[in-house]
């Protein structure tokens, strides 16, 4: 079954709302800035969530990256979504 095709703009809106309600800063465009989240629909993969920061010194700490990734996964899984990691854990892929 091709889950990515089911994860369109409607799912992207839901993901944006859920993450915003959980206290994350979700950027209006797919590129994240200053610690916000980039969220976009990739027709081949699903809805993508990526955390980025202009404060590159934070990104070098594995503990910070792990904590953010765990928090994102927890929020999304508790909301009932199917979540996997891509690009070495730098992107979360939501397919339902």
Image (cartoon, grey):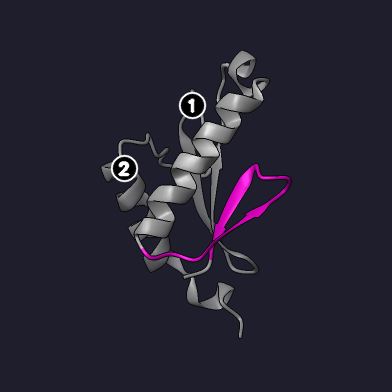
Side of 84 relative to 76 (left or right): right
In this rendering, is residue 63 above or below 15? above
Q: Which mark is residue 45?
A: none
Where residue 35 sits: x, y (%)? 48, 26
Residue placed furthest toward the right: 88
Where residue 36 sits: x, y (%)? 45, 32
Q: Which residue is mark 2?
A: 20
Dot 1 falls on a residue whose secondary structure is: loop
> Which residue lies at the image location 59% right of the left edge and 18% below the top edge?
58
Residue placed furthest toward the bottom: 1
Pick whichever, 67 or 17, lies toward us: 67
Side of 12 relative to 57 (left or right): left
Query: CA–CA distance between discs 1 and 2?
Result: 13 Å
Q: Which residue is mark 1?
A: 35
Q: Which of the 4 image quadrants contains residue 56?
A: top right
Where residue 50 sits: x, y (%)? 56, 43
Work out whether residue 36 can be spotted. yes
Q: Which of the 4 image quadrants contains residue 59?
A: top right
Mark 1 residue crowding within 10 angstroms, few (<14) / some (14–19) / many (20+): some
Q: Which residues are magenta?
A: 80-94
> Which residue lies at the image location 30% right of the left edge and 36% below the top edge?
23
Pick whichever, 44 or 73, lies toward us: 73
């Amino acid at each position: 079954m091709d889950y990515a095709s089911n994860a369109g703009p409607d799912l992207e809106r839901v993901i944006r709302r859920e993450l915003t309600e959980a206290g994350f800063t979700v950027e209006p465009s797919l590129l994240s800035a200053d610690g916000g989240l980039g969220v976009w629909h990739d027709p081949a993969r699903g809805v993508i969530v990526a955390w980025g920061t202009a404060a590159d010194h934070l990104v070098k700490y594995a503990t910070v990256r792990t904590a953010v990734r765990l928090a994102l996964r927890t929020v999304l899984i508790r909301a009932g979504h199917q979540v996997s990691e891509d690009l070495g854990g730098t992107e979360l892929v939501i397919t339902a």
